[in-house]
């Protein structure tokens, strides 16, 4: 390439030096320049070929080197895989040898077991041969004994025939007649023994049933916690100080009269320090009065209008408390799914007593007893609890509804779609109706257990409450009576009349009529004071 460039410069120099020559000289110079260009391209092409050949040779050497490296790597991998294959062959060979040794051990054990069984079979065969020889010997002995027995039987048969003939001669009966007579005697004796056995079996079954029943009842009683009767007819309200007693009484006693008229209780204010006594045979009425008095003391405004307002408010709130009491009792008894009205009615039993026994606690106790006994007998414990819990629900409203608490309770259960088993248990728990299920019988037994246990009831308190209820019932039968309350432990009946219907003169006559009716229809100790209260109020609001 440098040669070509030099040739070009030379041609240029010649051209510059001969610029003054003729045209021929220019032609020659042009030819020489063209030849130089051709030579230049030929030399360039040759150099390019040489360079391309050098690159090709270098690429070929690189390829040879890569192929060589690849061959070496392949040989290395081949050797590694060959070693792995040899290792795997050795491992498999060791495993096969171990398996072969294990099978040889098993074969050896099997051979030993077979040898042991062969020895055992051989010993058994020897023992069997020995027993066979002994059996043959025994058979020979038995054959000899059988022969001797047959000979003796023949002798005995002959003797029996002789005895039969002798008996027939003595008894003057044939064999058939004697057999018939013997059958009759044996039959009579068998009948007597059968009757005795049946009587003994019945007595044993009765004793067993009584014992099991006692065990079931005792177990149920032991597992049921029961309280003793502690119900009273008075409530003590504690005061913050003795000065408030004067405010409770009010000017000329107007506050205490308004309180007793609104709540139907008797307030006893005596010398007991910081306390007053609320007396009433109706626990619900007494509780409302207690809450009213406590709220009056907390409020501080004690006057007739406020007393009536709080008394009505406490009566409304008592309805909510009754629902809560019914729900808590149902939860404690394990009874679910009761209608809301039934729960509310059951809550009223919290303030109802029977012979001094709280009826709601009694219902819970009967539910537990009936459920436990039903579970031990394999019956439906939940249904038994439900029936036991509701059996006395009629007592919650028997003071306001005609009929016995049994009839009222059954009607309530039917009204709110309780199961027939529950309805029958309520109707039959006092024997008024026949029991149609075992659950009804268990409820009846549980009711008797709960009511008859020691300390459960007090007869005198129930009679006292019944007398007070009768006293109020007689008084309410007169026309114009708005409310009436038995107070002072039944020694006084306070009658609130409607002022529009009863004037002052009629009030005096009403007191006389009530006293005469009480004398005619009731029995009571001492005397009963009849107090008729007629009050007229005119109220107007200044706006």
Image (spheres, helix red, strand yellow):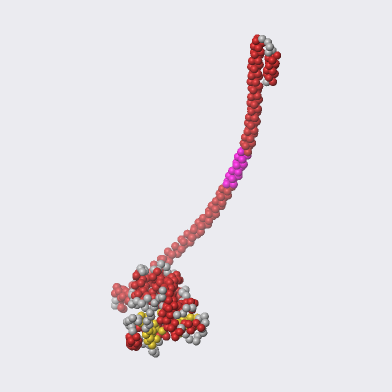
Q: Residue at x 42, y 69 (%)?
A: 335
Q: Is residue 85 magenta?
A: yes
Question: Which is nearer the eye, 159 or 120?
Answer: 120
Question: Which is nearer the eye, 48 or 455?
Answer: 48
Q: In the image, residue 158 lies at what x, y percent?
A: 35, 71
Determine the image quadrant of residue 22: top right
Relative horizontal placement of residue 366, taking residue 66 as reference (left or right): left
Relative horizontal placement of residue 103, taking residue 158 as reference (left or right): right
Determine the image quadrant of residue 47: top right
Q: In the rendered view of the protein, which quadrant contains the N terminus?
A: top right
Characterize the magenta stretch by its predominant secondary structure.
Answer: helix
Q: In the image, residue 304 lies at what x, y percent?
A: 43, 80
Q: In the image, residue 492 lies at what x, y percent?
A: 39, 86
- Magenta residue span: 81-100
Q: In the image, residue 117 lies at what x, y percent?
A: 53, 54
Number of marks drawn: 0
Res 66 visible: yes
Res 93 visible: no
Q: In the rendered view of the protein, which quadrant contains the C terminus?
A: bottom left
Relative horizontal placement of residue 399, taking residue 38 as reference (left or right): left
Q: Residue furthest bottom?
A: 526
Q: Is residue 342 above or below residue 36?
A: below
Q: Is residue 400 magenta?
A: no
Question: Which is nearer the eye, 445 or 123?
Answer: 445
Q: Residue at x 54, y 52 (%)?
A: 114
Q: Residue furthest front?
A: 543
Determine the image quadrant of residue 465: bottom left
Q: Residue at x 37, y 85 (%)?
A: 532
């Amino acid at each position: 390439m440098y040669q070509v460039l030099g040739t070009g410069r030379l041609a240029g120099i010649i051209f510059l030096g001969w610029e003054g020559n003729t045209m021929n000289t220019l032609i020659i110079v042009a030819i020489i320049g063209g030849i130089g260009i051709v030579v230049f391209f030929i030399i360039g092409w040759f150099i390019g070929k040489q360079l391309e050949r050098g690159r090709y040779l270098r690429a070929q050497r690189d390829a040879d080197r890569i192929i060589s490296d690849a061959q070496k790597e392949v040989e290395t991998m081949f050797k590694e895989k060959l070693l792995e294959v040899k290792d795997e062959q050795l491992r498999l060979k060791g495993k096969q040898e171990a398996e072969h040794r294990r099978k040889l051990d098993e074969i050896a054990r099997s051979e030993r077991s077979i040898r042991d069984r062969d020895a055992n079979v051989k010993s058994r065969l020897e023992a069997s041969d020995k027993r066979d020889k002994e059996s043959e010997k025994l058979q020979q002995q038995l054959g000899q004994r059988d022969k001797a027995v047959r000979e003796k039987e023949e002798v005995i048969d002959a003797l029996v025939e002789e005895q039969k003939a002798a008996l027939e001669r003595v008894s003057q009966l044939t064999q058939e007649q004697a057999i018939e007579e013997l059958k009759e005697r044996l039959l009579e004796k068998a009948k007597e023994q059968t009757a005795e056995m049946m009587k003994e079996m019945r007595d044993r079954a009765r004793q067993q049933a009584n014992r099991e029943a006692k065990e079931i009842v005792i177990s149920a009683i032991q597992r049921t916690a029961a309280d003793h009767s502690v119900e009273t007819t008075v409530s003590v309200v504690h005061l913050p100080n003795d000065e408030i007693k004067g405010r409770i009484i009010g000017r000329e006693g107007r506050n205490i009269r308004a309180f007793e008229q609104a709540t139907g209780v008797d307030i006893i204010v005596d010398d007991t320090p910081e306390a007053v006594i609320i007396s009433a045979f109706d626990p619900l009425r007494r509780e409302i009065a207690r809450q009213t008095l406590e709220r009056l003391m907390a409020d501080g405004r004690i006057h007739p209008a406020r007393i009536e307002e709080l008394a009505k408010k406490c009566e409304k709130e008592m309805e909510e408390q009754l629902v809560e009491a019914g729900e808590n009792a149902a939860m404690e008894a394990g009874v679910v799914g009761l209608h809301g009205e039934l729960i509310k009615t059951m809550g009223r039993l919290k303030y109802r007593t029977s012979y001094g026994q709280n009826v709601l606690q009694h219902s819970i106790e009967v539910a537990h007893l009936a459920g436990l006994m039903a579970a031990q007998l394999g019956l439906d414990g939940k249904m038994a609890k439900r029936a036991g819990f509701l059996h006395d629900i009629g007592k919650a409203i028997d003071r306001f509804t005609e009929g016995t608490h049994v009839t009222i309770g059954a009607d309530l259960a039917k009204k709110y779609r309780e199961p027939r088993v529950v309805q029958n248990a309520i109707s039959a728990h006092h024997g008024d109706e026949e029991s149609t299920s075992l659950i009804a019988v268990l409820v009846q037994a549980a009711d008797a257990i709960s009511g008859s246990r020691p300390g459960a009831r007090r007869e005198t308190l129930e009679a006292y409450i019944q007398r007070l209820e009768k006293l109020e019932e007689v008084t309410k039968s007169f026309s114009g009576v708005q409310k009436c309350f038995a107070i002072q432990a039944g020694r006084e009946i306070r009658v609130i009349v409607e002022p529009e219907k009863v004037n002052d003169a009629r009030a005096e006559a009403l007191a006389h009529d009530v006293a005469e009716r009480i004398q005619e229809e009731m029995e009571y100790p001492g005397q009963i004071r009849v107090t008729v209260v007629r009050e007229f109020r005119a109220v107007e609001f200044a706006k």
